[in-house]
Amino acid sequence: MNVAHLVCLDCQREYSLDDPRWRCDCGGPLDIRYFPVFDISNIWERPPGMWSYREALPLKADAQMVSLGEPLTPLVPLKISGREVLMKQEQLFPTGSYKDRGVSLLISHLKSIGITDIVEDSSGNAGASMAAYAARAGMRCRILVPEGASAGKLTQIRAMGAKLQSVRGNRQAAADAAVQLADSLFYASHAWSPFFYHGTKTIAFEICQQLGWRPPEVLILPVGGGSLLLGAHIGFKELKQAGFISRLPRIIGVQAENCNPLARIFNSTDPTGDLPADFLPLPTIAEGIAVSRPIRHRQVIAAVKESKGAFISVSEAEIQGTYKNLLHRGFYVEPTAAATIAGVESFIRLYPDPRGVIASVLSGHGLKVQPV
Ligand SMILES: [Zn+2]
C-alpha cells in the first residue's frame, strides 16, 4: 500500500489515515484514498483468505493483523429454479458471518493507531464479530443492540466479554445512542468506517481467484447498510484497475420488501434523491438487512448503477419459504441469508436465461438463531 488518506465523500477534505475519527467535521462519511498493490507471488505463498491480499488493504506496513484465521470461504454450487448458482459460504467465518472480513481489518487499523476502547451498534452479527476481534486485540468493547435482537447473538456478544447494552426502540435508536457515546469511546461503526468495507472487498478478490481470475457475470448480495455490496464493488474495480479482470459483474442488491429504502430510491423517478423522509419500515425476519436509513445510500446506489445492476425486494412469505427450503437442503443459515436466496430466485424468474456465472452468498450462520 502507498501513502493513504481519509477523504470526505461530501466535501473532499482529507485527513491522515492515523486520525482517530469516524466521520468528517462536516458530518459526511469518509472513504480511503490509496493505491492497492496486488503481488501474485505473495498471494499464492500465504495461507489462502483475506490476509493473503495484505498489500491491497489500507493498513500500515508495520501494523499487526488482528486475525482469527479468516478462511477462503468455499464457493458451492446450488441449483436454484433449475439454474446453477455458486454460493460463497460466508457463514463459515470465525464468528459466523461475513462481517469478520470488515471487522478484522477495522480492528487491526484501530489497534495500530492506539485505540483501546470502542463502541458499536449492531443488530447482532457485526456486534458479535466486533466483540470477538476486540477480545483478540485486547480492547474494551461496548455493543449497543436494539430491542428484539436474536438471543443467540446477544449470548455470543456477552460471552466474549463485551459490555452489552439494549436500547429501547429500533436499529436507528441503537445507532443514535452509540453516537452519544462517541465522545468518550471510539465509535467503531461498521456503517461509518471505510475500513470495514475495505475488508469486505476481499470477497471480490476471493471469488475472482476461485473462478480462475474471472469475475462472475452476476453477483447477488444482501443489502442493509450496503457495506458488503460496496466492498464487493470496490474490490472488483481494484482488480480491474490492476489489470486482473476486464469487466465488472452486474451487482444485484436484495432488500426485504418491509425495509427497502435503497430499492425504493433506485427504482424511483429520481434515483439520485435522498431517502424518503416519511419512509416507515415494517418488521422483517431478515433482521440483518433491516436498515431504514443507510448512511452510504448514495454510494451504494452509484455502485449498483455503475455495475449495470438492479435492486430486488423480497416479501416475508418469500423469505420464509426460501429459508425452509435452504434448511431442508442442508444449509443451516439464518433468515437474513435466506432473503438473499429469495432474491436469487426472483432474479432467475425475471431473467430466465442469464448467460455466464451467477454467484451469491450465504451471509450468516443458523446456529445463533432459533429457526422461525
Ligand atoms: Zn466533509
Image: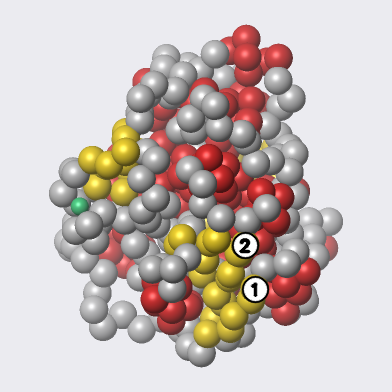
Residue at image location 68% in from the left, 15% down from the top: 44
Q: Which residue is label 1 attached to?
A: 163
The structure residue drawn at horizontal position 53% and vertical position 40%, both measured from the top left corner, is: 112
Residue 349 seen in render: no
Q: Are marks 1 and 2 in contact (CB under 8 Å)?
A: yes
Quadrant location, the C terminus? bottom right
> Closest to the observer: 232 or 309?
232
State the image coordinates of residue 357 (x, y, percent, origin top left): 57, 33
Task: Identify the amino acid type marked 1.
Answer: Lys
Question: Is residue 295 at least partly visible in the picture?
Answer: yes
Residue 174 vs 22, above or below: the answer is: below
Asked whether 94 or 188 is in front, the reply is 188
1 vs 2, front mark = 2
Disc 2 is placed on an element classified as: strand
Q: Is residue 144 above or below residue 353?
A: below
The amino acid beneath tag 2 is Arg
Dot 1 or dot 2, earlier in sequence: 2
User: Residue 132 at x, y = what percent?
Assistant: 70, 56
Residue 237 in which image quadrant: top left
Position of residue 130 measured from the top left corner of the image (x, y, whole percent): 61, 58
Tag 1 secondary structure = strand
Number of disc labels: 2
**Label 1, label 2: how far apart the Cα atoms are:** 8 Å
State the residue position of label 2: 140
Residue at the spot 36% in from the left edge and 83% down from the top edge:
280
